[in-house]
Image (spheres, helix red, strand yellow):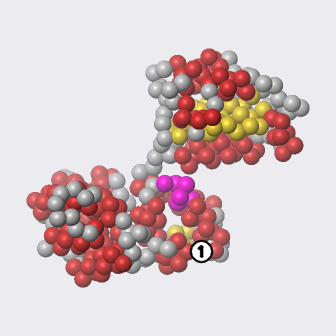
Amino acid sequence: MSDVTKIVSDIKNRNIKPVYFLMGEEPYYIDKISEYIENNVLAEEEKGFNQMVLYGRDVTISDIVDNAKRFPMMAEYQVVIIKEAQDLVKTIENLSEYVENPSPTTILVLCYKYKTLDKRKKLYKTLQKNGVVFESKKLYENQVTEWIKKILSKKNLKIELKSILMLVEFLGTDLSKISNELTKLAVVLPEGSTITPKDIEENIGISKDFNNFELRKAIGVRDVVKANRIINYFGQNQKANHITVTISLLNSFFTQILIYHSLKDKSSNSAARALGVSTFFISDYKTAAQNYPMRKVSTIIGLIRDADVRSKGVGANALPAIEILKELIFKIIH
């Protein structure tokens, strides 16, 4: 995030580079930087003749270079933005020659999503010398918590930890999706509010009581009744509660319990670092580890993998997905 702030700050101060190569697995920041350049470098009256947006699937490297070598009309710069530049992956190295001697009056922006350049090759090295290379990396789940808090602090909002977990469980670590939902909440909630699980349920449609986080918690304490209630809810709302997501989260949970069992130092801070979670959850892992000895955990991971395979239709006597999940939970807790 500090790299993003620096790039935007430099552009604001008109310390502008001729080429911006935005790459990486997380599209959110790639979009944010390209949008900032698109919206702020040129005045509105300059954009008609001096700003163009092209798509990688529609152009060649030669087309990009030809456009980049044009001169601006009655403006200091022209802006050329190439979206979905990853579609040019097979020929992208051919851009090296232009980057060696880029036009000083063109700002060329390439949005190279879900991929990265080979750092050993000429293009990457030349970009580092004459332009800006930004790599947008995926955040881990434990990093998304702080990211959500920072985004909301700019909107003068706070959020409860359970609300964050509901968002991450439902949306994963896709920052664009999370940002869209946070924007919706900022519209409907007054400034200074703290976002509660009820707010998430009412405005985004995620149940605060019947979700994978609550299921994992119920399994950890071996609460059969609550676990069955949640599974029955999932059965009635299968479109919003896909078995693949539940099985994946259960696999992660029990893998983390296995790691917890193996730790020599089980203090909150040390265990949180090893498991990649907030210290807030360590008591949950401690309880689960007491309820599920290491040997049992190993067996459960095998059961989860078997359920995953069966849920994808492999094997004879295929059961409906919800029945596979019910059977799995029964075997885990008993």
**Image quadrant where residue 46 sits:** top right
Please say if 26 is above or below 238.
Answer: above
Total labels: the figure holds 1
| Left or right side of 175 for 131 | right
Q: Is residue 180 magenta?
A: no
Residue occupying image coordinates x 43% and y 76%: 207
**In the rendered image, which residue does mark 1 sit on?**
193
Task: State the image coordinates of residue 108 (x, y, percent, origin top left).
Answer: 68, 31
* Residue 253 appears in the picture as rendered: no
Q: Is residue 177 magenta?
A: yes
Outermost right residue:
74
Q: Is residue 125 shown above or below 242? A: above
Where's the C terminus, which quadrant? bottom left
Locate residue 258 relative to residue 278 in the image: left or right. Answer: left
Could you tell me which secondary element the residue under label 1 belongs to?
loop
Given residues 88 and 318, the one toward you in this image is 318
Q: Main secondary structure of the magenta part?
A: helix
Amino acid type indicated by mark 1: Ser
Residue at 55%, 74% in the rendered image: 203
Farthest residue to the front: give it: 316
Q: Nearer the viewer, residue 150 or 37?
A: 37
Magenta residues, start to end: 174-179
Above-or-below relation of 322 to 316 = below
Give residue 218's quadrant in the image: bottom left
Where does the image place residue 163, in percent across and percent down from the top left? 47, 70
The spot of residue 328 in percent (x, y) is: 20, 68
Give the image quarter of residue 151: bottom right
